[in-house]
Amino acid sequence: QVQLVESGGGLVQAGGSLRLSCAASIRFFSTYTMGWYRQAPGKQRELVAHITTGGSSTYAESVKGRFTISRDNAKNTNYLQMSSLKPEDTAVYYCNTKPALVSWGQGTQVTVSS
């Protein structure tokens, strides 16, 4: 059964950092582009970063220069290092393939206080 388990969220002050992790029980994980998505209250879920099988990464303009996505294929895990956090980064963060092909996990809440 495919499962995505996100962790690492929390409450942080503006300017702070967090590192999110996503453990993915996806067969042939290394063959998928993986993404981090977020959903703020009252807003649609949006893709904030993704990383290809070859390790190339792409970021939404709103997080470029502050977030770094990475992956460890040996551990079927991908990460999102978030720095210089802003209150507008407050959201539930999810990982999934890109495009999103598997059931969503529970996500991890990130709250940035001003």
Image: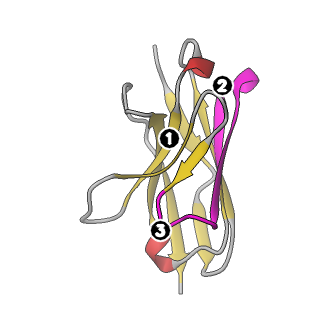
* Image x and y of residue 88, in percent: 44, 75
Dot 3 corresponds to which residue?
62
Q: How many marks?
A: 3
Q: Disc 3 to disc 2, how far (Cα)? A: 27 Å
SS for dot 2:
loop
What residue is rendered at 48% in x and 69% in y? 89
Q: Disc 1 to disc 2, how far (Cα)? A: 13 Å
Neighbour tally class for label 3: few under 14, some 14-19, many 20 plus, Cα within 10 Å: few
What kind of residue is marked 2?
A: Asn
What residue is rendered at 46% in x and 45% in y? 94
What kind of residue is marked 3?
A: Ser
* Image x and y of residue 83, in percent: 67, 68
**6 sits left or right of 106 in the view:** right
SS for dot 1:
strand
Q: Residue 64 is drawn in which quadrant?
A: bottom right
Q: Disc 1 to disc 3, how far (Cα)? A: 15 Å
In this picture, is 93 found above or below 114? above
In this picture, is 38 found above or below 100? below
Dot 2 corresponds to which residue?
76
Q: Is residue 46 magenta?
A: no
Q: Which residues are magenta?
A: 60-80
* Image x and y of residue 93, in percent: 47, 52
